[in-house]
Amino acid sequence: MTVAEAASEILFEGVSKWFPAPRGGKFVAVERVDLAIARGERLALLGQTGCGKSTLFSLIAGLARPNAGRVLVQGRDPFRAFAALRGHLAIVFQNDRLLPWRNALDNAALGLELMDVPAAERRDRARHWLVRLGLSGHEADYPHALSGGMRQRVAIARAFATDAPILLCDEPFSALDELTAQRLRREFLALVAETGRTAVFITHSISDALEIGQRIVVLRRPACIAYDVRLEAAGDDERVAIRAQIRAALAT
């Protein structure tokens, strides 16, 4: 194992991904990406619509394989080791994707059910995370009886209940109103920090990236890294400068 592999929870080395174009040739979605994401890091992948963010997301999740280079998640190829990595990654989508015929508790326990966790344990773990996310007393409610913010809380509880060390977050707050999104974002980030998870957020919002990320990677089309910056020690003046650099990188 190389030093980069040992130090990284997620690793891209020379990764390219393309698809057949409708009129022949190929459409390049990702081009020669090198990216190492450390264990416990909170990374925002920022880019305009169509720049390849979702393709990178799919490569990490093992839903696609690169045409060139390699992707490693915890030292394994996520496409080939898809089954072995089950329970190591959890996904929070833009929409809650709750099953309408399941109540909040059973929806929050779904990931654990797919991992064959015994019924009593999965219900206890799902209930614990529903309570942590402010849904005590709503365990028996069905999705139609919950607000948008509450449904997204159930989706987040579902992800945390699996104890997956890696969270993949596809604009999880963008479908909510501004105040609800702000409140839930702060709670979510606090839980990520408390539990030491590695979290990768996809976003097209500069403000969201600056609030979410310890590190921001800006992508331009086809997905290649235009700017990579760490924010941990950045003061207010530095953040203003970073925002300007992000805007410039997005405009190229």
Image (cartoon, rainbow, N blue to C red):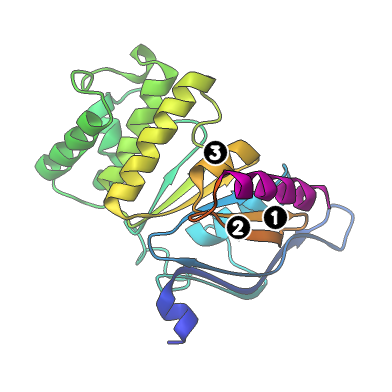
Q: Position of residue 99 (x, y in %)?
A: 37, 29
Q: Position of residue 122 (x, y in %)?
A: 17, 42
Helix, strand or loop at mark 3:
loop
CA gap, disc 2 and disc 3: 14 Å
Residue 184, disc: none
Please say if the residues under marks 3 and 1 sit with CB atoms less than 8 Å apart: no
Extreme-left residue of the structure:
120
- Give the amino acid type for the residue marked by disc 1 in the picture: Leu
Q: According to the image, label 3 marks what residue?
A: 171
Q: Is residue 178 above or below residue 159?
A: above
Q: Position of residue 250 (x, y in %)?
A: 76, 48
Please say if the residues under marks 2 and 3 sit with CB atoms less than 8 Å apart: no
Please state which of residues 58 and 229 is positioned toward the viewer in this rendering: 229
What crowding class fits label 3: few (fewer than 14 Cα within 10 Å), some (14-19), or many (20 or more)? some
Question: Can you tell which quarter of the image residue 28 is in?
Answer: bottom right
Residue 56, disc: 2
Helix, strand or loop at mark 1:
strand
Q: Position of residue 63 (x, y in %)?
A: 53, 57
For image coordinates 57% across by 46% down, the residue present is 202
**Does the stretch in magenta take in 251?**
yes
Q: According to the image, label 1 marks what residue?
A: 219
CA gap, disc 1 and disc 2: 10 Å
The magenta-colored residue range is 236-252
What crowding class fits label 2: few (fewer than 14 Cα within 10 Å), some (14-19), or many (20 or more)? many
Helix, strand or loop at mark 2:
helix
Q: Is residue 85 above or below residue 77?
A: above
